[in-house]
Amino acid sequence: MMRRARLLIDTAAMRHNLGVAREAAGTRSIFAAVKADGYGHGLLTAARAFSAAGTDGFAVATPGEGLALREAGLTERILVLQGALTADEFAVAAERSLDLVFHELAQLDLLDQHAASLPPGRIRAWIKADTGMHREGLMPESVPAARERLLVCPAIGGSIGLMTHFARADEPGTAPTEQQVETFRAIAAEGPGETSLCNSAGLLGATAVGGDWVRPGVMLYGGNPFIFGEAAQFDLRAAMTLKTVLVAVRQVPRGESIGYGGRFVAPETMPVGLASVGYGDGYPRHAPDGTPILVNGQRSQIVGRVSMDLVTVDLRGIQAQVGDEVECWGSGLPIDQVAQSAGTISYELMCQVSGQLRAEGTILGQ
């Protein structure tokens, strides 16, 4: 039987968004980010959509994700952002011709230990430089020596790439981002090789940054990468829609509370509906009263705490009955609006949709 809560994945929207990224990228090549199970949209579903739209490569977190793409027949370049941490992962990278990021000196030590057992020249290497985010990456002064170690390693083929990651690209024009760019350019000038700086926000908001490759992520799924505005202003389309139905409609008397903890108190006798979705499905438990939701295409709000598989919806001014459609976010309600109301980001909402919903989701636009 069909689940009441259901996930719709629109691959046509993904292909469109890749086109938006392509236009913004200009002559730069694209690593389409498909980590975290394709931002919750399905690793292979997303990768195949982006491949059909002409992406030049994919960005994943781990060699295992890269292996899954290769086993599915995808031949584009695959950038492994966390690099390899074990001998087996280096072996997979070599056997499957993956691009590995080196962000930690211990990874270079491990490569040296196992290089002789790896097929020669099969791994493309990138050094991640810490230009100011201070999450991962080699400090600028360590990059030249790391580059030399990689250049003489028989397992590495081609020139050594250089990349970094912006800490505040979602705030365009900030001094920290400009400083990161300056630091990166100084490092890049010390040696040849491909370069990559921009994520979604960097791509859409910092067009003069340059580099050979860009790494768009959330924009490919219809999310807004900035702390302001809407995805639609960048011509991005929602690739994920979460829908469900009303399973009950009732009147709550004035002054009575709704849900766990009695957080919401009815200001008047009011109709409410119970939508069959909750934190067990990935809807944010911390979403406050007033978080937007659609009932039969009409904008409403949730009232009361989110339960495991139920959300209470304000039906004042809306004609609704049991079985009517509810949209939590998607093509009719931007996911960023829900995320902002819930005090989070669209990335988290996309990624935390339950595995069962994803497994049973409907793929559109194929």
Image: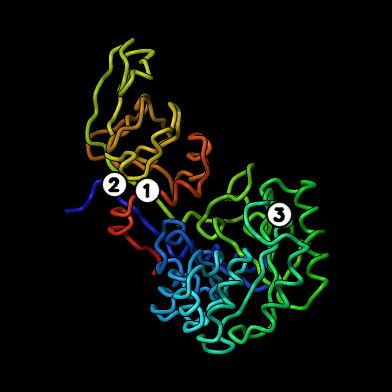
Between disc 1 and disc 2, whose residue precedes? 2
Instruction: Estimate the x, y position of residue 195 in percent, counting from the top left.
Output: 71, 71
Can you name the residue that lies furthest to the front here? 113
Q: Determine whether, in the image, residue 360 is placed left or right of residue 205.
A: left
Mark seen at residue 242:
1
User: Residue drawn at (45%, 28%), measured in percent from left and top?
Assistant: 290
Instruction: Estimate the x, y position of residue 56 in percent, counting from the top left.
Output: 58, 76
The Cα atoms of the two marked residues, 3 and 1, are separated by: 29 Å
Q: Nearer the viewer, residue 198 or 302?
A: 198
Instruction: Estimate the x, y position of residue 123 in percent, counting from the top left.
Output: 57, 81
User: Residue drawn at (35%, 15%), measured in percent from left and top?
Assistant: 266
The amino acid on which the numbered mark 2 sits, given as a three-letter code, is Ala
Can you name the residue that lies furthest to the top here? 255
Q: In the rendered view, would you say 307 is above or below 100?
A: above
Q: Quadrant of residue 273?
A: top left
The Cα atoms of the two marked residues, 2 and 3, are separated by: 36 Å
The amino acid on which the numbered mark 1 sits, given as a three-letter code, is Leu
User: Residue drawn at (53%, 78%), measured in percent from left and top?
Assistant: 98
Query: Within 10 angstroms of label 2, few (less than 14), some, or many (20 or more) residues?
Result: many
User: Which residue is identified by label 3?
Assistant: 205
Q: How many marks?
A: 3
Q: In the rendered view, would you say 365 is above or below 151?
A: above
Q: For numbered disc 2, what is the local secondary structure?
A: loop
Task: Check whether the beta carbons of the residues at disc 1 and disc 2 lie within 8 A of each other.
Answer: yes
Between disc 3 and disc 1, whose residue precedes? 3
Can you name the residue that lies furthest to the bottom here? 120
The amino acid on which the numbered mark 3 sits, given as a three-letter code, is Gly
Mark seen at residue 5:
2
Q: For numbered disc 3, what is the local secondary structure?
A: helix
The Cα atoms of the two marked residues, 1 and 2, are separated by: 7 Å
Q: For numbered disc 1, what is the local secondary structure?
A: strand
Query: Within 10 angstroms of label 3, few (less than 14), some, or many (20 or more) residues?
Result: some
